Image (tube, rainbow, N blue to C red):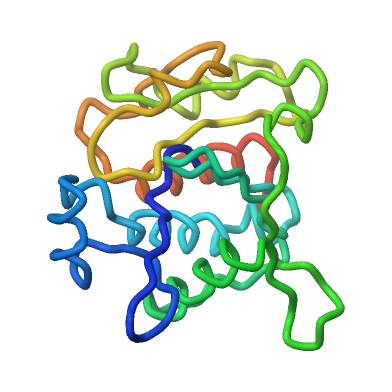
Amino acid sequence: MEQANLETVKSKRGIEIINCDDHQKTINKMGKKFEDYRPDVLHQCLLSLFDSPLAKAGLLQVFIRTAKGVLIEINPAMKIPKTFGRFSALMAQLLTKLKVRSANGSAMLASVIKNPVTEYLPMGVKIVGTSKLAPLVNINDYVASLGIERKPLVFVIGAVSVGNPGMENELVQENISISKHGLSAACVCGKICTAMEKLYRVV
């Protein structure tokens, strides 16, 4: 997930993730746009990703890079909070303490790690960006045409409400559009997971 809107602010309630609903005055003071503070987009994406059969089969790894360049690794076993409030509190804790452990402290659920993300990817893996501005493909046919069978494949999906981070990502080797319609980031996540499930024969 690329360009995620995760930025903290200190308030009377403590350290919070800035969002366009609760921190409009703060955003106006910074001279920024409301659409640049949509952490709910990332929340929706993570719910879609981790609720997929692909994730439940242990075949999904998620990295997040924030708009500030902070790189986050999510444990595939992590259960994403269903409510935005709980998710926001978890992300605030992560950015403050640089890690989040399970309730019993035995497992690392998420952690801030060193850039670049390529240090954690398989050697020679294909990195594909997603953008409405890129050539249109049928995602099912596209992943089948790569002939990767059960080999890894990396998708860069913008965790934003507007813009095309995939087109601007320096690591991307090829950009594709998976629909003639403008899709939400969460919808893109779901369609890619479904395509990979078909490729990997996950039911």
Quadrant position of residue 137:
top left
Quadrant position of residue 189:
top left
* Residue for point 47% across, 23% down: 129
Q: With respect to residue 139, does 160 lie above or below?
A: below
Nearer to us in this view, 11 or 170:
11
Q: Position of residue 176 (x, y in %)?
A: 41, 18
* Residue for point 41% across, 56% down: 7
Q: Position of residue 10 (x, y in %)?
A: 39, 72
Q: Position of residue 104 (x, y in %)?
A: 80, 88
* Residue for point 62% across, 50% down: 72
Q: With respect to residue 22, does 196 lie above or below?
A: above
In the displayed structure, does residue 199 sit left or right of residue 42? right
What count of labels does the image hold? 0
Quadrant position of residue 22:
bottom left
**Residue at the far right in the pictured view:** 106
Nearer to us in this view, 152 or 1:
1
Q: With respect to residue 11, does 196 lie above or below?
A: above
Q: Quadrant of the C terminus?
A: bottom right
Nearer to us in this view, 195 or 37:
37
Q: Position of residue 8 (x, y in %)?
A: 42, 62
* Residue for point 70% across, 58% down: 111
In the displayed structure, does residue 41 sit left or right of residue 127? left
